[in-house]
Amino acid sequence: MTATEDLIASAEAHSAHNYHPLPVVVATADGAWMTDVEGRRYLDLLAGYSALNFGHGNTRLIEAAKAQLDRVTLTSRAFHHDRFAEFCARLAELCGMETVLPMNTGAEAVETAVKTARKWGYRVKGVPDGRAKIVVAGNNFHGRTTTVISFSTDAEARADFGPYTPGFEIVPYGDPTAMRAAVTENTVAVLLEPIQGEAGVLVPPPGYLAGVRELTRERGVLFIADEIQSGLGRTGRTFACEHEGVVPDMYVLGKALGGGVVPVSAVVSSSEVLGVFKPGEHGSTFGGNPLACAVALEVIAMLRSGEYQRRAAELGEHLHRELGLLAGAGRVTQVRGRGLWAGVDVDPAYGTGREISEKLMDRGVLVKDTHGSTIRIAPPLVISKEDLDWGLAQLRAVLGG
């Protein structure tokens, strides 16, 4: 038995089977490359579902973490610490907003956004107690907590986890007519991914997000943008909403905010909206801890330069042009996405998404499948054009061309 086989067998024996990972065991990583326990290198075209936008082992982020590790890592929110105020101020500034509520994981941030919207609805909008409704889109992915799966249309995520939390209405993604019909006097928020990642990197029709923004303003409803996967440089802008000139009432952030070093998430909004919370009503022991703030501050500084957004836009244009050639050759039925983010629907004649991912793994490229014959491509934003082209060449080879 090889070292890989032994470690996989041990993991299978002692861990819950809530994931179906590819049969590779990573030992080290740097930039856009990972190395397994047997020394084989792989090009990472997944980037931890956008958690690794700045690459593995980014020197600036590792140094920021090391410096903070020597000082203080956790105080809990029972006390102030010297990185918290700057983190909140800089993140609010990056978002063009006023107030930050930090958490740890994306799912926690979504739960926080739901609680915020409901409380705002009761305290500010005047919705009768217990009647608040949030409109969401079909095929969404906002996490896997019991509340979040209550408004999921993914049977795999929902089955056997009921009873489900009420208070949500699901409408088709990208359908403005259905959205308008769903928003009523008791609606407190519309919660959307500007681009649906888990669904296969689905980009809404032009004007859809702007239309939702107009509708929510007209009806006195919060527009909440879940930019956990789409935000912080991935699409060629700081936020995917920017592609339509839209500023929501609330951003939900995570993944890349922690630089692939520590879990960091946040809800960012106005002081009026987040001001509905009083001490003791919501919180997290680790949310906004010193180590998280130190790393996130470096992430924010990197984004403020605009370098990573420009790189994602330029390389993303190249990525989509090359994938378009595969579609033109008939091996791919559709390509979607923005920036360095693509959902690729492979002709089922060439295999399922899982089978294509395994064949790419055998050629030294790591991607992940979703929904049948779709694979997602989301390399670290630091990837070189040469490495990206090499990875695409492996995809062409797998598809027989």
Image (cartoon, grey):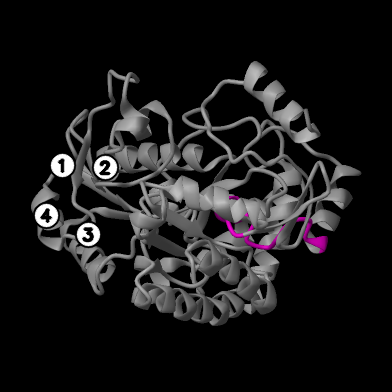
Task: Quickly name the residue at label 2.
Answer: 121
User: Percent from the top left, x then y, of residue 46?
Assistant: 58, 55
In primary-sequence order, the first of circles 2 and 1 is 2
Disc 1/disc 4 C-alpha distance (Å): 16 Å
Q: CA distance from mark 2 to mark 1?
A: 8 Å
Disc 1: which residue:
186
Q: Secondary structure at mark 2?
A: helix
Q: Are marks 1 and 3 in contact (CB under 8 Å)?
A: no
Checking the image for residue 216, the label placed there is 3
Q: CA distance from mark 3 to mark 4?
A: 14 Å
- Residue type at mark 2 is Gly
x, y percent for residue 363 = 65, 57
Name which of mark 3 and mark 4 comes first in the sequence: 4
Q: Which residue is mark 4?
A: 178
Disc 3 residue crowd, few under 14, some 14–19, many 20+, Cα 10 Å? many
SS under mark 4: helix
Amino acid at the residue labelled 1:
Asn
Q: Which residues are magenta?
A: 45-59
Please tell me whether residue 168 is drawn above or below residue 84 in the rendered image.
above
Counting from the top left corner in percent of width and height, residue 352 is at: 41, 48
Above or below for 22 versus 238 = above
Give the spatial CA distance, label 3 vs label 2.
13 Å
- Which residue is found at the position 56% from the left and 74% from the top? 312
Judged from the image, the secondary structure of the residue bearing numbered disc 3 is helix
Q: Is residue 234 visible?
A: no
Which element type, helix, strand or loop, lies under badge 1? loop
Please tell me how crowded label 1 is: few (under 14), some (14-19), or many (20+) other residues with Cα within 10 Å.
some
Q: Which kind of residue does numbered mark 4 sit on?
A: Ala
Asked if residue 47 is among those painted magenta in the image, a careful observer would answer yes
Query: Which residue lies at the image location 53% right of the left edge and 34% below the top edge?
Result: 20
